[in-house]
Image (spheres, grey):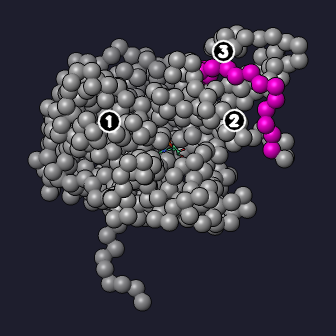
Amino acid sequence: MLGLMMDTPLTLTVIMRHGDRNHARREIVSVTHDHALHRYTFADCFARTRRLANALDRLGAGADARIATLAWNDFRHLELYYAVSCSGRVCHTVNPRLFEEQIVYILNHAEAEWVFVDPAFVPRLESLAAQCPAVKGYVVLSDEAHMPQTTLPNARCYETLVAAAPDTYAWPELDEKRASGLCYTSGTTGNPKGVLYNHRSAVLMAYAGALPDTCGVSAMDAILPIVPMFHVNAWGMPFSAVLTGAKLVFPGPTLSDPKRLADLITSEGVTISAGVPTVCLPLLAHARDNGRSLAPLNRMVIGGSACPLSMMEEFRDRHQVRVVHAWGMTEMSPLGTVNALTPETAPLTGAALADQMCSQGRAIPGVELKITDDDNRELPWDGKASGALKVRGYWVCRDYYRLDGTGGAHDADGWFATGDVASIDPNGFMRITDRAKDVIKSGGEWISSIDLENTAMGHPSVAEAAVIGVNHPKWQERPLLVVVRKQGVEVSATELLHYFEGKVAKWWIPEDVAFVDELPHTATGKLSKLELRKRFAAYRFPGT
Ligand code: AMP
């Protein structure tokens, strides 16, 4: 027997309407290239969103068009999030920090029709536009007064398009399974892979992200997403905020400026912020060095890499800020687990508390976890056994965009293999113990160890090379190149590191080189990164 409740689809349009109607006066404050502090309300935002949807129609954007953005966190990007998705199109956020070939690959693979770009990224796009012939045109996120001179083909001014369009729009009734957003991850081997979100997954993530034991968002909050809107929808914050009526504060291009962030926190009454550990370090240092308070901030969502204990303690002890330590992935929209208090953990003190804080936390309702051994047998939740971490749930991807099941990330039962290695304790607290995937995460961005190894192997003195991620106090991880030299050949670390210049992005170049007599291999002759990481567990980069 079927229930007799309405079939109202789970769409972002419903969230947008709710925010527009019920939180009309809530503010959105943005730093942008053309505004020191732009300020308007949810009602203003959604009126412009309707204009933008009309403008997209007028541009001739297809019903299913992938509309790419290369943009910082600000009000225009937010308008794009809603106008693109709620008009039935796909908001395709592109990470401008990727290097040129990756951006070209991503735009072409997604067959992006229009690209909306911040003036800061116009020069980057100019140099690659010729390689993206399917793009119909570029819209610069600016007013006429600040439009840069550009060679981009068919370049338009955002504010002119918006101003010329009517502010009423008949939002279509969308299927909740309709694609709403697209974000490529380079956290796997090979080309970046597209994760195609739908309205249903985005809505459920917005609800789950706002739960008290997740980020605990309410209408009394003001949220400062430092995590970029090109990284998994800024962890769903722009949706949870509109859902709950929390004020939004966007740092625009100043997201790496700790003074500006601290100023925004104080002047705009920010209560929740979110970012990777690397952006929190300078914020803490700025507050420490200048004797500044971060009040009224009271929660800092930190994920993307393991949050160091010292960071959580400094936020707690100096600023009375609770770190919400979260784990997730692009493929998971992104939230999977959060470390929140439970009756079992609340009484802990001293070393037991410190240890507990380092756990990545428990599954958010809507996500299931399991750990398995090499034969896909489930391992116990005893806090000791560690194995491949697999997930399934409402906002977990079931395939990659246009890979048609060849992504190789799902097991026979449909669980998604995260590439992380973890243990889970009897209370459900998960702890990442290692990473099975051959990628390194430095400051929140991925580095391919395989590409670095291939480059190193091109050097005439190298017999065998392996690259592993090693803890780094600023970047969380940096690549360490481990090399077996050819017999009788001398080569210095400096010479090897020079060899990478011009062959890989500058920030990919290994931090250091360790010379060894041989590298560990598995029984099948494969390089054992697991063993190598164990051997170098105590290694520290010079000067750290
Ligand atoms: P991305 O898809 O770029 O968001 O990266 C997801 C990956 O980042 C995960 O599979 C983990 O390897 C890593 N990661 C994310 N959050 C954490 C965390 N809290 N602790 C440790 N690793 C994390």
Residue position marked by numbered label 1 in the rendering: 314
Task: Give neighbour class at mark 3: few <14, some 14-19, many 20+ (Cα, 10 Å).
Answer: some
Distance from disc 3 to disc 2, alpha carbons, whole Å, reads 22 Å
Q: Identify the residue shown where x is 79% and y is 37%.
A: 520
* Rendered residue at 61%/28% (across/down): 539
Q: Outermost residue, front direction?
A: 350
Q: Which residue does the numbered mark 3 point to in the structure image?
A: 497
Is 414 on the left or on the right of 254, as rendered?
right
Instruction: Inspect the image, locate mark 2, and give the three-letter code of the amino acid beneath it.
Output: Arg
Q: Quadrant of residue 222?
A: top left
- Residue 261 falls in which quadrant of the image? top left
3D distance between C-alphas at marks 1 and 2: 31 Å
Q: Quick one: 355 or 187, which is closer to the camera?
A: 355
Q: Farthest residue to the right: give it.
A: 487
Q: Which mark is residue 481?
A: none
- How crowded pointer 2 is (Cα within 10 Å; few <14, some 14-19, many 20+) is rated as few
Badges 3 and 2: C-beta atoms under 8 Å apart?
no
**Residues in magenta?**
508-522
Query: In the rendered image of this protein, does residue 154 appear above or below residue 213?
Result: above
Please say whether residue 301 is visible from this viewpoint. Answer: yes
Q: Which residue is mark 2?
A: 535
Callout 2: SS? helix
Question: Is tag 1's residue or tag 2's residue first in the polypeptide sequence?
Answer: 1
Q: How many marks?
A: 3
Q: Does the magenta segment cover residue 514? A: yes
- Kindly report the secondary structure that dominates the magenta region of the rendered protein: loop
